[in-house]
Amino acid sequence: MKIRKIKTITLLIILNLMLPGCNGLLPEKKVKNNVSLEDYQMGGIKQSEALQKIKYHSTKSEIEPINAKVDEINWEVKEEQTGKRVNVEKTLKELLDSKEGKQIKLVIEEVKPKVYKDVLERNIVEIGSYTTPLLDSRESRMTNIEVASNELNNIKVLPGQEFSFNTVLGKRTKQKGYEQAPIIIKTSDGIKKSPGLGGGICQISTTLYNAVEKARLEVTERHMHSKKIGYAPKGKDATVAYGSIDFKFKNNHKYPIMIKVYINNQELTVKIFENRN
């Protein structure tokens, strides 16, 4: 039994020595003469050295894939990018199998990203939208609406967070770009229209209020105008005045929401999106 065991061990040692690169009976395989990899001469080098050179040149050709990503500021989705990776084993085999004088290229394979744009976009869902007509399009009023819209656009409200129209817009001042335009005020002679700084932005708060209602968000403060307005049905408006009258709502959903404001074709539109990614 001992003799048979010794013979088996001896046979295994001999077989091991016969493997390429082990200083056994078979020499390590070499690249044939005048064979090049891309523009690099590889002829005559051993397999182990060829492997190291392939790995070195691979680093210059490989590109990591980039996943699609949602921009935190405006929730626009940046498209994914496919990566590139060198298949070292296949490249080495082609190199060793090539005939003299042949030039081969790195075997490059695509690497797919894990996150795709269309998947992220599907999870950014419009949950509420409302449009009101811009009946009074005088320049000063439109300026105020545009200034306020820019302040409101892309505002994000987290789950459980309360939104305040006056907090977001702050005090309406000339320094911010607001101009004098008609506002509704109460006087001793009754309800009248009078020039006021920031006149017209109640159309934004009204449009936002109706979009919030469509989105089934929780309204926590809302005040109606003292007289009927032309751009929304009776009882569906929301007036604001800095320091006294506000429009507020709470995000009672489990996902963040974002407000988007659009002005086009003599219409003002507010949309509310929910990010479920």
Image (spheres, rainbow, N blue to C red):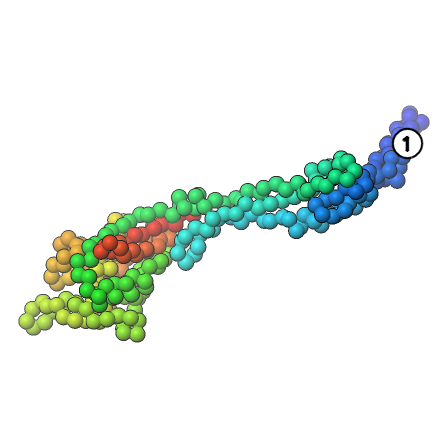
Residue 67, compared with residue 155, is above or below; it is above
Residue 193 lies in quadrant: bottom left
Residue 267, compared with residue 84, is above or below; it is below
Residue 162, compared with residue 19, is above or below; it is below
| The N terminus sits in image quarter | top right
Q: Residue furthest right?
A: 3
- Secondary element at tag 1: helix
In the image, what residue type sits under mark 1? Answer: Thr
Residue lying at 63% horizontally and 48% vertically, measured from the top left: 62
Residue 80 appearing in the image: yes
x and y, in percent, of residue 85 in the image: 62, 44
Residue lying at 36% horizontally and 50% vertically, measured from the top left: 274
Judged left or right of residue 170, residue 40 is right
Residue lying at 17% horizontally and 56% vertically, measured from the top left: 231
Residue lying at 31% horizontally and 47% vertically, measured from the top left: 127
Residue 141 lies in quadrant: bottom left
Judged left or right of residue 75, residue 243 is left
x and y, in percent, of residue 253 in the image: 34, 50
Residue 11, compared with residue 153, is above or below; it is above
Would you name the residue on which mark 1 appears? 10
Q: Nearer the viewer, residue 220 or 106?
A: 106
How packed mark 1 is, by other alpha carbons closer than 10 Å (few <14, some 14-19, many 20 or more), is few
Judged left or right of residue 190, residue 156 is right
Q: Residue furthest left?
A: 189
x and y, in percent, of residue 134 in the image: 20, 57
Residue 245 appearing in the image: no
Q: Nearer the viewer, residue 56 or 101?
A: 101
x and y, in percent, of residue 213 in the image: 24, 51
Callout count: 1
Q: Residue furthest front?
A: 101
